[in-house]
Image (cartoon, grey):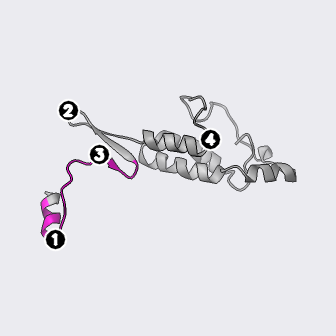
Amino acid sequence: MAKSQLESSYEIKDLGKAKLILSMHINRNLLGDVTLSQYVYCEHLLKQFNMDLCLSVTISLPPGLVLLVEDCPFIPNEVNEMKNMPFCETLGSLMWLQVATRPDLAYSINKLTCFTYNPGKTH
């Protein structure tokens, strides 16, 4: 086993079965199935970006939604207003979810990252 091979080369301490790693909760059922959850991380992100009171949706982008460059702000006060929005930080945080446990977010994140240089309210 991997554990015995590691013990032969390194001093290790067995802490039992992992329950949490890299913000992912590891759940095991009686059949031995393993699932990963980032529920706590999601709750943290919602609070961090002041979205903890928002309503949930089942899809990340509505069907038929077209995101356009024309939706980017061009008036200086609108550009400055959007610079205060943590658009890139939010997308970066969501990318961790996408990579680890939520591949269903990939399409939406991909579409939104096209506007990181000048996001508008629509984005």
Residue marked by disc 2 = 31
Q: Quick one: label 2 or label 4, which is nearer the N terminus?
A: 2
- Nearer to us of marks 2 and 4 is 4
Q: Quadrant of residue 11?
A: bottom left
Residue 105 x %, y %: 52, 41
**Which residue is at the front of the view, 5 or 70?**
5
Q: How far apart, in angstroms, are the residues tagged by discs 1 and 4?
A: 47 Å
Numbered disc 2: secondary structure: loop
What's the magenta region?
A: 4-23
13 above or below 115? below
- Nearer to us of marks 1 and 4 is 4
Q: Amino acid at mark 2?
A: Leu
Q: Quick one: label 2 or label 1, which is nearer the N terminus?
A: 1
Q: Amino acid at mark 3?
A: Lys
On screen, residue 75 versus residue 4, left or right, reads right
Residue 113 x %, y %: 63, 51
Residue marked by disc 3 = 19
Q: Is residue 22 on the magenta stretch?
A: yes
Residue marked by disc 4 = 50
Q: Quick one: label 1 or label 3, which is nearer the N terminus?
A: 1
In this figure, what is the number of numbered marks?
Answer: 4
**Which residue is at the front of the view, 123 or 23?**
23
Residue 87 x %, y %: 66, 50
Numbered disc 3: secondary structure: loop
Residue marked by disc 1 = 9
Q: How far apart, in angstroms, are the residues tagged by discs 2 and 4?
A: 39 Å
